[in-house]
Amino acid sequence: MNRSYFKGVQALRGLAALSVMLFHFRWNINESYPNLGDRLFGWGATGVDLFFLISGFVIALTVKTTPATFSGAVNFLKRRAFRILPAYYALLIITFMLSGAMSTFHYEDKALNFFTSLIFQPAYHDHAPFYIDDSGMYGIRWTLNYEVYFYLVIGLLLMLPMRWLFITLWFIASLVLLPWFNGYAINFSPTGYGFSSGQLNLISNPMILLFIVGMIIGASISYIQRINSKLMALLAFASLIFAYSQFSEGKFLAHGLLSSGWIYALVLLFVIGAERSIENWVPQWLLKLGDISFSLYLIHNLFNYGLAKRFDSTGIEPGMLRFTLSIVLSLLLAWLSWRYIEKPAYRIGKRREKISAT
């Protein structure tokens, strides 16, 4: 089976976005039923780890089909840019307008977070693994700093003939040698290291290991597909039950490979191996959720910050109604973003790639 689209992975992408959204909206439930929101969705932030694993997996498949040339590397970076930048910057403009617009520049910390969001850079060196103010409207973009860094590294190394070797050497240098030569004990914790530079802390943070594990799974796809798909389907189901049981008991709720990361790595591995058996059983709504997952991830936090005053002004107080409306409106806006920003931008990128190839 030679393919680049896996329905099971698309469903996991949608579930990851959904879990992060429910995590950020759980406080509304807590207002009506104290601590219930935390008990139900306190695990939801771990969806970020699943996103990172899936990104690594997808990029590994892309590496296999991208020629080791300058144009191949450029096309790779163009595809990534058309995939994330239009929706991201559209939301950034909306966020900027809703968070005070020009008044942002009256506050040093807000201005710093805004400017660094434009160029996908950390704002601080001492707030791992975020390295930005993750409590505000721009907070959701901390993961994009890792994503863009990862894409740039892979894109630049793609033009080299022994790409896998140089990719391996780069991440050994940044994740192992860099902290070791600076006197730090190597660890797997997302708290990372204590460099005085936010950039050095970001590129050496063990959160990047999630991308690496995803890439290893992607690079091993031909071996994974040799395993009986029905067996893998059973293992996928068992891994999801295991994840639910552990998370519901409050275990492995932190970010990182040694916390939720290894559990999601197993889920991803088994779901990929089970593709032949489950592809006809994946619900369409989950696939659609996967389609809009990136926009949903970007947009939903507007309802906790920029649009929160609109809820208050209309008398919709924190509670179950606000929780429900936040979800429904987030899904609607995410679909609109996907339909009218993401999808057209992706098509433009594909057309440009075809033109450059002729």
Image (spheres, rainbow, N blue to C red):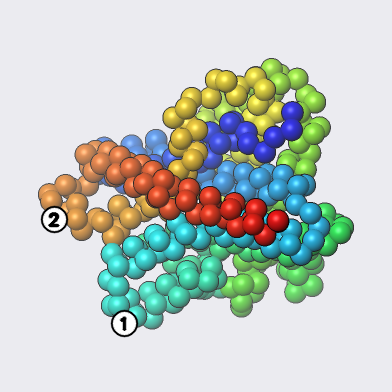
The quadrant in which residue 241 appears is top right
Compared with 92, 45 (above or below) is: above
Q: Position of residue 12 (x, y in %)?
A: 55, 36
* Badge 1: residue crowd in 10 Å (few <14, some 14–19, many ≥20): few
Q: Relative to residue 14, is residue 350 drawn left or right?
A: right
**Residue at the extreme front of the image, as rendered:** 358
At 47% across and 69% down in the image, what residue appears? Answer: 117
Residue displayed at 65% across by 72% down: 200
| Residue 144 seen in the figure | yes
Query: Is 180 or 328 nearer to us in this picture?
Result: 328
Q: Where residue 228 sits: x, y (%)?
A: 75, 20
Who's the residue at 77% across and 43% down the image? 219
- Left or right: residue 175 versus residue 44 is right
Picture disc at residue 325: none
* Amino acid type at mark 1: His
Local SS, label 1: helix
Would residue 184 appear left or right of 205 to someone viewing this image? right
Marker disc for residue 106: 1
Identify residue type, mark 2: Ser
Label 2–label 1 contact, CB within 8 A: no
Give the secondary structure at mark 2: helix
Quarter of the image that includes the C terminus? bottom right
Give coordinates of residue 102: x percent, y percent: 30, 77
Q: Quadrant of residue 204?
A: bottom right
Expressed as whole percent of the image width and height from the top left, the position of residue 91 reads 39, 59
Please give the name of the residue rendered at 44% of the width and 30% of the height, measured from the top-left corner: 285
Q: Earlier in the sequence, mark 2 or mark 1?
A: 1
Badge 2: how crowded within 10 Å, few (<14), some, or many (20+)? Answer: few
The dot on residue 313 is 2
Query: Residue 194, can we see it?
Result: no
Q: CA distance from mark 2 to mark 1?
A: 25 Å
